[in-house]
Image (tube, grey):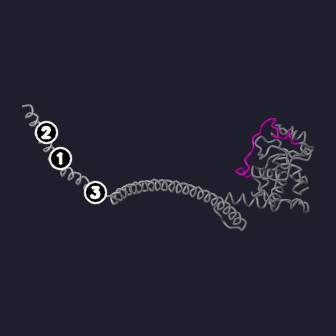
């Protein structure tokens, strides 16, 4: 019995072993087919072996190339933006510079044109042409005449005194009357040094009646435009109060050039200043604002004290004494 059992077991084992081998043989073709399919699929995808490597390499390079193109395009865009920005900035700076330079050029051109117009205006005035800029023309002409004629009279012979036929009544519109101020002194005279200016430093306005003036100055009184002047120390002075309503265009001394009366002295000085381009008014024998201004300009130009009236140093400079 034991032997039979052993045999049956041995046969069973043998049959099991044979069945296992058969199953292994059956499973091997399936495994080989699966392996072949797995091998074929990557081969088809990559081209197999060396071609697969080439394909993957090409894919890699393609990806890198696309990345490179993308990066390059991005760089170009950034560079383009930078260039556009820098170009815009440069254009803006150039525009500002151009505007600034144009503005400066226009300003300089305007100044040159203005100077040229002024010069042409002066030339036209000297030539006798009529211009619209009357005041500027007069000032330019007067300055030109002063520069041209300055010093000619002093270098020549002394001017001989002339007698002028003057109006009997003063033109108060051009030479308005001054008002009397008791004890008034000449402004600035305290700074005028020298014996020739003593009369200006000592002068002060005084009001006296007719009897007082006649008692002190007797025959040294003359009348100009109906108003009395008295003679003292080589100068004519207004005799305030001799006639309460007397007319005076100037309250101060007037040098008695060649012992001429005040109106004739003034007329001779006006003529001399006309010849040198300082006085452009009418020769009327009145020492009004226009005449005093011309005298002051002459005195400043010739280094004299600006007394704004007729004094001995001014007449000497004019060549009249």
Measured Cα–Cα span from mark 1 to mark 3: 32 Å
Crowd band around label 3 with a 10 angstrom C-alpha radius: few (<14), some (14–19), many (20+): few
Q: What residue is shown at x 13% (from left), y 41% (from top)? A: 14
The residue identified by callout 3 is 45
Q: Residue 24 carries which label?
A: 1
Q: What residue is shown at x 85% (from left), y 41% (from top)? A: 189
The quarter of the picture where the C terminus appears is bottom right
Dot 2 and dot 3 residues touching (CB under 8 Å): no
Q: What stretch is highlighted in magenta?
A: 170-192
In terms of sequence position, does the residue under pointer 1 or pointer 3 come before the other?
Answer: 1
SS of the residue under disc 3 = helix
The residue identified by callout 2 is 13
Crowd band around label 2 with a 10 angstrom C-alpha radius: few (<14), some (14–19), many (20+): few
Residue at the extreme left of the image, as rendered: 1
Q: Is residue 216 magenta?
A: no
Measured Cα–Cα span from mark 1 to mark 2: 16 Å
The image shows residue 169 at horizontal and vertical percentages of: 75, 52
Measured Cα–Cα span from mark 2 to mark 3: 47 Å
């Amino acid at each position: 019995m034991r032997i039979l059992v052993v045999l049956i077991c041995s046969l069973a084992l043998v049959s099991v072993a044979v069945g296992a081998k058969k199953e292994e043989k059956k499973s091997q073709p399936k495994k080989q087919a699966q392996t072949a399919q797995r091998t074929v699929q990557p081969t088809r995808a990559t081209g197999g072996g060396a071609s697969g490597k080439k394909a993957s390499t090409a894919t890699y390079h393609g990806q890198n190339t696309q990345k490179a193109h993308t990066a390059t395009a991005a760089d170009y865009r950034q560079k383009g933006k930078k260039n556009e920005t820098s170009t815009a900035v440069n254009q803006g700076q150039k525009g500002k510079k151009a505007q600034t330079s144009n503005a400066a050029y226009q300003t300089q051109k305007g100044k040159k044109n203005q100077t040229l117009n002024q010069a042409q205006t002066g030339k036209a005035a000297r030539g006798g042409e009529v211009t619209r800029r009357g005041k500027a023309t007069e000032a330019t002409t007067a300055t030109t005449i002063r520069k041209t004629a300055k010093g000619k009279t002093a270098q020549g012979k002394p001017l001989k005194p002339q007698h002028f036929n003057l109006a009997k009544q003063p033109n108060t519109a051009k030479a308005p009357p001054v008002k009397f101020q008791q004890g008034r002194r000449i402004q600035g005279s305290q700074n005028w040094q020298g014996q020739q200016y003593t009369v200006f430093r000592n002068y002060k306005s005084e009001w006296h009646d007719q009897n007082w003036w006649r008692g002190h100055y007797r025959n040294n009184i003359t009348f100009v435009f109906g108003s009395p002047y008295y003679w003292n120390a080589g100068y004519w002075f207004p005799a305030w109060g001799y006639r309460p309503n007397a007319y005076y265009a100037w309250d101060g001394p007037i040098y008695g050039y060649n012992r001429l009366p005040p109106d004739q002295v003034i007329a001779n000085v006006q003529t001399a200043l006309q010849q040198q381009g300082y006085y452009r008014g009418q020769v009327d024998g009145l020492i009004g604002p226009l005449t005093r201004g011309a005298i002051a300009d002459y005195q400043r130009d010739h280094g004299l004290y600006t007394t704004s009236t007729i004094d001995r140093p001014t007449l000497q400079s004019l060549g009249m004494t």
